[in-house]
Image: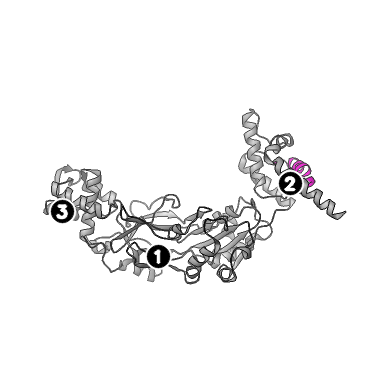
Amino acid sequence: MTSAVSPAPDHSLLSLLLSGERFWPTEPTSVHDLGLSEPFLESLASKLLLSSGNMSGRAVSAELCLPFKIVESTLERLRTRRLVTHAGSGSFNDYIYALSDEGRKRAQTFHSECSYVGPAPVPLMDYVISVEAQTIGDEPIRRAELIDAFHDISTAGGLLDLLGPAVNSGSGMFLYGAPGNGKSTLAQRITSCFGQEIWLPHAIIDGRQIITLYDPAYHHKVEEPVDSATWDKRWTRIRRPTVVVGGELTLDNLEIRHDAVSNVSEAPLQLKSNCGCLLIDDFGRQRITPSELLNRWIVPLENRHDFLTLPTGKKLQVPFEQLIIFSTNLQPSDLVDEAFLRRIPYRIDLDDPDEDEFNCLFQIASENAGCFYDPDSVEHLLDNYYRPYNRPLRRCHARDLLLQVKNYCTYNDLEFEMLPEYFDRVARAFFTEVETKDLRAAGEELTGMSR
């Protein structure tokens, strides 16, 4: 068994934070700068050669995201102990390395202990410092930035005046209202208001426990710095994350998930969303009850840090630094108690649009869909499919109706236009017969009651 990580954090990162400069993962020049031990690096290199076969030193350097100088020293130590041999010459004063028979046995032992192979992990303390330096709470947004983020969606009724302070609070918010009024769309746009990329490590380590953090499902890489800039390649540059979870959310998603076979763990959702946004979509319809989520997060929401349990039983204190948005079709007071509402002080009701905004929504949707806006067609819709049935207007209807019209036109080799007769063609599929009957029945019931 090898010792994986030295207890001291990277002091260059700490100095960067204290100086008030923007976070930048400086390139390590020694093993001490990495915060990792030599035996750990040897095991990582051995496992890579075991899984990939013969490799040049620079190829090993690229796979492990470590400077060539450090990797070369690691491979030479293994060669001195006859665990690795030179299998040939490479370019630029490099060699092709291969495991010896004894080295293969040793690598298999390392693999059985932990099968992680990939970018070298970053010590937990370095990650904690990076989150504190990149938190969205240090970057308050202004009205102009919010307007730019929402430039192509409707935000009538003073919505921006409600969203702006809620976002800057960093304490989270409820977006509630009828389905189809854009709660999820608004939540996903909010992160873009900050407009800055962040640095994220591929994996973090505490003791011998490796936790993978980078997840391509939520973390989107951006252009890396120019070649002349140097940085620690164990970190990748991404857009501020927006992690969206819906009805599939369980308590297991909020804890470190450990694979007993590989002995590698995966970070929970709240860790993956640090320095970004965590959207709990359709809140109240998850596999866990709102009260269970309340009990799990009531302390992190108050103190801005969370406690996670490693497979060894050790407790880790990690940052809880993201904007949490609860999107729901239900009233927040019907879902959670007063203690929880106090920690989510902003509750924004997304009402149905009025007819003026409905026309505005069709203007935006027609521009996005690629057709000319026709106000007479919108009036035709209102006269024939909304007003007679007291059907509520929804913000998603403009986009969805135009999409169905476009599909109809494509199928029939027609020019995509916003015409009343095209809306009549798709109305039967869009406004379901079941819904129409329900609305008529409700209207008849109200008429009977008034009599």
Which comes before the other along the chain, label 1 or label 3?
A: 3
Q: Amino acid at mark 3?
A: Leu
Q: In front: 344, or 438? A: 438
Q: CA distance from mark 1 to mark 3?
A: 36 Å
Residue at image mark 1: 308
Q: Is residue 196 magenta?
A: no
Reply above or below: 91 against 2: above
Where residue 413 sits: x, y (%)?
63, 27
Horizontal placement of 29 versus 235: left or right? left
Reply above or below: 435 against 250: above
Q: CA distance from mark 2 to mark 1?
A: 49 Å
Location of residue 335 by image quarter = bottom right
Q: Amino acid at mark 2?
A: Asp
Residue at image mark 3: 78
Callout 3: SS:
helix
| Image point (58%, 53%), residue name | 184
Q: Is residue 376 magenta?
A: yes
Residue 438 shows which numbered tag? Answer: 2
Which comes before the other along the chain, label 2 or label 1?
A: 1
Reply above or below: 258 against 93: below
Where residue 79 sits: x, y (%)?
13, 51
